């Protein structure tokens, strides 16, 4: 209550209070405070600062921050300049293999849109990819799914072992039984057996802030495009606000563009779990034919986009095996150390 009152004390005309009644599936009733125009909080800062440095780890796609740039330009006048800098990755190109996987092992186009991903053909292709990639990876293999609902469909088909590796699954529950427990069990299996499979969810606890360095993640795959729930009331209000701003000539994203940006930020968060220091290495697979489209991969982090190519899984598998062979030959003690740890 105190936090809500404090937020209301500094509210603007673009803020909203969202009330959610208890749902049919026993969702807890809630009250949310939503700031639709976060840029308004920076106006005083821009007015007093000589220069502004805005830095972050996962900022792509950057177009979301155009309203902030507009504030700088208004203050500094026509001579103002906004410089965008995106640093290259600290690891050499030989430490990264990246593929936009467009087709499965049987030749079907990978299409994990909500109305397609539950079909027998898509599930069969995905299970074959899981098995092959898990068997090839000399360490942990992590697969991020677009939702817990889809994960609950795939996990039983994967079973407790796939590709000769033990399988661990993130659940909706928080705390020990949801993400922390499966992560610890997965890490122990990687050290004990030289590899394991972790099935997690984009936007879940394991997709952000977890340090999957070295053998904990030698392969990370993002299954489909994790678009946010289109029926979420907060998202609907934000998209309406952005469309209204665009209609009035303001810079920034439209509602639809914001929706896509939320998705791609989730993708970039997931792939960022894989390489954590200058000597690390990993393979990254983006599983869906839509990743081959420039409108989609143009929002992938630059360091990955520079190295990624589109390929069916048959070609991607050959690349995986060659990559893993080259890297394990270059650092043969890596997996052995993980097993001994």
Image (tube, rainbow, N blue to C red):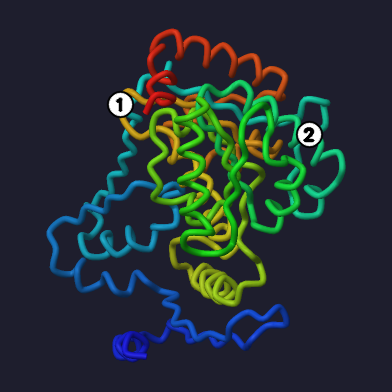
Q: Residue furthest right?
A: 120
Q: Is residue 208 left or right of residue 291?
A: left
Q: Residue 284: where, in percent of width, then height?
A: 54, 30
Classify residue 38 by image quadrant.
Answer: bottom left
Identify the mark nearer the N-term, 2 or 1: 2
The quadrant of the rendering that contains the N terminus is bottom left
- Residue drawn where x is 63% and y is 37% of the image: 291
Q: Residue 325: where, in percent of width, then height?
A: 52, 11
Residue 83, disc: none
**Mark 2–mark 1 distance (CA, rounded to whole Å):** 34 Å
Q: Secondary structure at mark 2?
A: helix
Q: Which residue is mark 1?
A: 278
Q: Which residue is mark 2?
A: 125
- Residue drawn where x is 51% and y is 32% of the image: 140
- Residue drawn where x is 65% and y is 33% of the image: 292
Q: Residue 229: where, in percent of width, then height?
A: 64, 65
Is residue 198 shown above or below 228? above
The quadrant of the rendering that contains the C terminus is top left
Q: Nearer the viewer, residue 50 or 7?
A: 7
Classify residue 83 by image quadrant.
Answer: top left
């Amino acid at each position: 209550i105190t936090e809500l009152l404090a937020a209301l004390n500094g509210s603007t005309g673009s803020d909203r209070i969202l009330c959610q009644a208890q749902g049919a599936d026993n969702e807890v009733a809630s009250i949310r405070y939503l700031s639709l125009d976060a840029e308004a909080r920076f106006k005083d800062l821009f007015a007093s600062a000589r220069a502004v440095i805005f830095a972050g780890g996962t900022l792509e796609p950057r177009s979301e921050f155009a309203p902030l740039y507009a504030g700088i330009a208004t203050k500094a006048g026509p001579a103002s300049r906004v410089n965008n800098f995106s640093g290259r990755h600290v690891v050499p190109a030989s430490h990264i293999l990246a593929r936009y996987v467009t087709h499965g092992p049987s030749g079907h186009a990978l299409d994990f849109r909500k109305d397609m991903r539950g079909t027998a053909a898509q599930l069969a292709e995905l299970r074959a990819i899981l098995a092959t990639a898990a068997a090839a990876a000399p360490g942990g293999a992590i697969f991020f799914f677009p939702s817990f609902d889809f994960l609950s469909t795939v996990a039983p088909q994967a079973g407790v072992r796939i590709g000769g590796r033990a399988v661990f699954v993130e659940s909706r529950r928080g705390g020990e039984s949801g993400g922390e427990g499966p992560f610890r069990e997965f890490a122990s299996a990687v050290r004990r057996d030289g590899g394991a499979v972790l099935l997690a969810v984009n936007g879940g606890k394991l997709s952000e802030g977890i340090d999957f360095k070295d053998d904990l993640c030698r392969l990370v795959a993002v299954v489909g495009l994790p678009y946010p729930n289109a029926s979420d009331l907060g998202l609907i209000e934000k998209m309406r606000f952005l469309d209204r701003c665009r209609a009035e000539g303001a810079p920034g994203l439209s509602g639809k563009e914001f929706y896509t940006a939320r998705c791609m930020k989730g993708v970039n968060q997931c792939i960022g779990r894989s390489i954590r220091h200058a000597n690390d290495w990993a393979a990254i697979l983006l599983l869906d034919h839509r990743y081959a489209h420039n409108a989609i991969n143009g929002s992938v982090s630059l360091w990955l986009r520079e190295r990624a190519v589109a390929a069916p899984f048959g070609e991607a598998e050959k690349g995986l095996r060659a990559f893993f062979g080259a890297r394990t030959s270059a650092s043969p003690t890596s997996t052995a150390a993980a097993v001994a740890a």
